[in-house]
Every structure is written in structure tokens, then in C-alpha cells.
Image: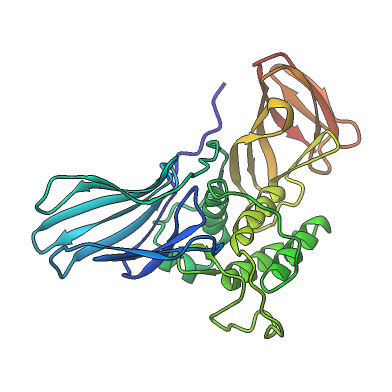
């Protein structure tokens, strides 16, 4: 069996000084300058703070990179006295600075803010929609191509604490608009709604904001400004992106339930469904091509396939789809591959 994999590495980067990034596993944004870091808690539970360096400038080839594989913020460049590279990373006891390469001094580690950090269980769920361009933030923002944006949004959403926010204040009204489009099966216009959400709800590099401080006219001017956490704009948005490609309802797993025409091909791997079920999905020409499914404990899984599919192959067996549904019986730790989906 040839595994469905995604080889692309998720790492957003910017060469602009003063860019803000979200720090994985925390509620903090980090504004990165060559000689200063500014930390702000987006939930306003902790006071802002800064950290200073004494690198001799000016700095050349300055780069700040959000590595979503290692869940770290990496900063590097060439100072007047040599190359420097360090990591900002959340550990169980707080936010750490790890100096990997210093211009003059030996590398060192230093805790910047001690507090208990709830390190999220690592989720391997990944999405690829066929985009392979360099992940420079300014170019991504300019192109506004959701084939590039969605996989990064989904990855970052998995490493930020999730919370539900039941409100339509500010940019949360755009979250509700995306949800309604998905629930109504509006495949043609749902991507445009996500583009509006992306433009209004994020500043710098995926740092969420409650109100559109760029005043783009996407939403009317707010009459009453409230103080709410903007982080669920990222995490709830990621869950809605997930639901375009896979949904779980009443014991049934729906595959590609609201696939927009902008994504004719793609892959979604290591999707963790309920009861220990893992799925890897591949589609091409807007049609399901392959599905690999396994169960940790062994069980019958009920799949809801895209409309018009009447049969498929499981290993060397021919499976019949009844009313758009297919029941698959899995032994513990068994992996089955389904292909040859016929209409």
C-alpha cells in the first residue's frame, strides 16, 4: 500500500523588521525586531513585556520564521560581528529563549517568562491543496490564495489552545458567515467568505484581532467595542476549514462534504476522528481518489461519500455504496485502502 503523505514543510517567514507572530502553545504574540522582542498576551491575563539584545548592527538577511513542524519561532541574520540564530519556544514551565548561534558569546538558554504552559498533544493532521510556493508572508497575503492560506491556518490552529466563543461581535460575525455557508453547502462562495475573514481578522503573521484595524470596509464600523479574546477567530476558523473536507455527525464520517471548486485536488492526512479512527484522504479533479482508514480498537465505520459515487474498491473487493453511505469493518490496528470510486 502506497501511503498518502504530505511532504511540504509548514514554515511561515518574513524579512520585515517588527513583524508580529503567534507563539505556539501560548496566547502570546511576539513582535520581532533585530534587537528587541515585544510580548503581548492576546487574552490580557499577563502584562506585556520585552526582551533586549545588544547585537551590533545593522543586521543583514534578517529573518523571522514560524516553524509549525517544531512549534517554535526562529530568528536569524548576520550582525556586524557575525551570524546569530535563536529560538523562542514554549515549554512546560514558561517561554524560553534558546540562543543557538551568537556572534561572540557562547550559546545559552534563558527563561523569559516563567508560568505553567499547557503543551497541547501533538496533532499530525495536515492539509495540502497543491500550492508549493515559498511561504513568505507578504507574498502570501498579497496573493490571497486559500490553497496556500488554509494549510497554514489549519496547522497553526492545532497548536493554539481552543476555546469556543459564542458571539457575533466584530470579526466573529465573519466566522458565523463562513459557518452558514458550509452548513448550507454553498461551495461556490464559501472561499470568498474565508478570504474576508482572513483579511479582517488577522494582522501581521496570523495574529488574530477582534476588529479590522486596517479599516478595509469589510464590516460596518462597530457601534460598541468590547474586550474579548480574538484567539478563537484562529482556532474556530481552523475547525471550519477542517469541516470543508471532513465532518463527523451522529456516528457518520462525511468525506469532502463541502469541497470548493477552487480546490480540485488535494490531500488531508492523519485526521483523528472519534473512537480512535484515523483517515488519510486524497482527491483529484474534484473527485475522491483514495482513502486510507484505520482503527486503534477495531470497529465498523460508516462513511458518507460524495454524491453520485455508487461503488469503490476495498483492497481487492468491490464495495457497493447504498444511498451515499458505505460501512467499513476494521480489525484493531488494521489499515484499509479504498480507491476506484465510480460514479
268 vs 65: above or below: above
Dividing the picture into quadrants, the one containing residue 254 is top right
* Image quarter (top left, top right, bottom left or bottom right) of the N terminus: top right
- Which of the two residues, 251 or 91, is positioned nearer the viewer here? 91
Q: Relative to residue 280, is residue 259 drawn left or right?
A: right
Rendered location of residue 322, percent (x, y): 90, 31
Q: Relative to residue 140, is residue 313 drawn left or right?
A: right
* Image quarter (top left, top right, bottom left or bottom right) of the C terminus: top right
Rendered location of residue 336, percent (x, y): 67, 21
Q: Residue at x 18, y 65 (%)?
A: 60
Q: Relative to residue 265, is residue 95 drawn left or right?
A: left
Judging from the image, the colouring scheme is rainbow
Q: Residue at x 68, y 74 (%)?
A: 170
Q: Residue at x 57, y 39 (%)?
A: 125
The extreme top residue here reads 331
154 vs 39: above or below: above
Dividing the picture into quadrants, the one containing residue 229 is bottom right
How many tags in the picture? 0
Q: Relative to residue 118, is residue 273 drawn left or right?
A: right
- Which of the two residues, 68 or 99, is positioned nearer the viewer here? 99
The extreme right residue here reads 323
- Which of the two residues, 25 or 183, is positioned nearer the viewer here? 25
190 vs 171: above or below: above
- Which of the two residues, 211 or 95, is positioned nearer the viewer here? 95
Rendered location of residue 199, percent (x, y): 57, 72
Q: Residue at x 63, y 72 (%)?
A: 227
Rendered location of residue 219, percent (x, y): 68, 80
Amino acid at each position: 500500500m502506497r501511503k498518502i503523505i504530505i511532504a511540504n514543510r509548514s514554515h511561515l517567514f518574513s524579512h520585515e523588521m517588527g513583524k508580529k507572530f503567534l507563539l505556539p502553545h501560548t496566547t502570546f504574540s511576539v513582535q520581532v525586531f533585530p534587537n528587541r522582542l515585544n510580548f503581548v498576551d492576546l487574552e490580557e491575563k499577563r502584562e506585556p513585556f520585552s526582551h533586549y539584545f545588544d547585537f551590533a548592527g545593522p543586521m543583514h538577511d534578517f529573518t523571522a520564521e514560524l516553524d509549525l513542524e517544531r512549534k517554535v519561532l526562529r530568528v536569524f541574520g548576520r550582525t556586524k560581528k557575525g551570524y546569530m540564530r535563536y529560538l523562542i519556544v514554549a515549554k512546560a514551565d514558561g517561554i524560553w529563549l534558546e540562543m543557538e548561534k551568537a556572534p561572540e558569546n557562547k550559546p545559552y538558554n534563558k527563561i523569559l517568562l516563567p508560568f505553567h504552559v499547557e503543551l497541547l498533544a501533538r496533532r499530525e493532521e495536515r492539509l495540502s491543496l497543491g500550492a508549493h510556493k515559498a511561504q513568505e508572508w507578504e507574498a502570501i497575503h498579497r496573493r490571497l490564495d486559500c490553497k496556500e492560506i488554509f494549510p497554514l491556518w489549519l496547522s497553526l490552529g492545532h497548536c493554539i489552545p481552543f476555546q469556543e466563543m459564542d458571539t457575533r461581535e466584530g470579526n466573529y460575525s465573519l466566522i458565523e458567515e463562513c459557518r452558514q455557508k458550509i452548513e448550507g453547502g454553498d461551495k461556490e462562495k464559501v472561499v470568498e467568505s474565508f478570504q474576508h475573514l482572513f483579511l479582517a481578522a488577522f494582522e501581521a503573521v496570523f495574529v488574530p484581532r477582534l476588529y479590522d484595524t486596517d479599516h478595509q470596509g469589510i464590516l460596518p464600523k462597530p457601534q460598541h467595542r468590547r474586550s474579548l479574546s480574538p484567539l478563537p477567530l484562529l482556532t474556530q476558523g481552523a475547525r471550519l476549514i477542517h469541516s470543508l473536507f471532513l465532518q463527523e455527525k451522529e456516528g457518520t464520517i462525511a468525506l469532502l462534504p463541502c469541497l470548493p471548486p477552487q480546490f480540485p485536488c488535494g490531500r488531508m492526512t492523519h485526521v483523528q476522528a472519534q473512537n480512535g479512527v484515523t483517515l488519510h484522504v486524497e482527491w483529484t479533479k474534484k473527485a475522491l481518489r483514495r482513502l486510507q482508514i484505520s482503527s486503534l480498537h477495531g470497529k465498523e465505520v460508516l462513511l458518507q461519500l460524495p454524491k453520485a459515487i455508487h461503488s469503490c474498491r476495498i483492497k481487492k473487493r468491490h464495495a457497493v455504496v447504498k444511498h451515499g453511505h458505505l460501512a467499513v469493518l476494521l480489525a484493531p490496528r488494521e489499515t484499509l485502502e479504498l480507491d476506484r470510486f465510480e460514479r
